[in-house]
Image (spheres, rainbow, N blue to C red):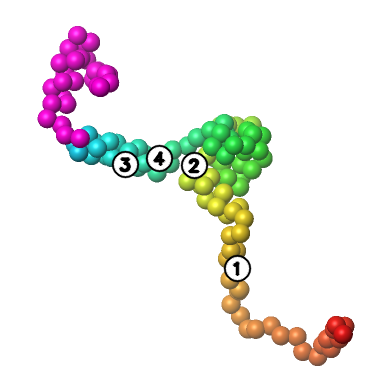
Amino acid sequence: MHSRVPAPAGIRPEHQSRTHESATRGLTAADVEAIAARVVELLRDESRLGHHVDTTAVAAMLGVSDDWVREHAAELGAIRIGDGPKGALRFELRRVRAALDRRRLGRRRESTPRRPGPERTVRGLELLPLPDDG
């Protein structure tokens, strides 16, 4: 069963079926799969170019309210479009995912590196005794 493919711009509907037939003649299932894989690849590349979505899209993706997204906008890496504190917010999905990963429960926290310098020790302090367990 074949589905109708929209005709490219400039091709009249009466010529569409002939154009579709000539365009698909000789294509194997492997050709169609290769084309589909390339389309998916191009769409993924496009999303890496910094595709921005609005508050509603992020809320739908996360299953939360628009208000929650606005309350956590800074943490989610929002960009304010427009002037003033009420300008529209836009989000890069890559940054939203990274922010969510940082909130993941059970994730090992990376220790913050110490500033370089001499070890700091306290001398001359008497420690309090611990109570006996027994």
Q: Nearer the viewer, mark 2 or mark 3?
A: 3
The Cα–Cα distance between marks 2 and 4, rounded to whole angstroms, is 9 Å
Residue 101 in view (yes/no):
yes
Give the residue type at disc 4: Ser
Nearer to us in this view, 27 or 50: 27
Q: Viewer-nearest of labels 3 and 4?
A: 3
Q: Which residue is mark 3?
A: 41
For the N terminus, the image quarter is top left
Q: CA distance from mark 2 to mark 1?
A: 27 Å
Q: Residue furthest bottom?
A: 124
Determine which residue is flagged by label 2: 92
On residue 112, the disc is 1
Q: Amino acid at mark 1?
A: Thr
For the residues labelled 2 and 3, say whether their Cβ atoms are less than 8 Å apart: no
Under tag 4, what secondary structure?
helix
In the picture shown, does residue 17 fall above or below 112? Answer: above
Q: Are marks 3 and 1 in contact (CB under 8 Å)?
A: no
Disc 2 vs disc 4: Cβ atoms closer than 8 Å?
no
Kindly identify the residue that appears in the image at 16 percent across and 34 percent down.
28
**Residue at position x 61%, y 80% from top?**
117
Secondary structure under tag 1 reads loop
CA gap, disc 2 to disc 3?
A: 19 Å
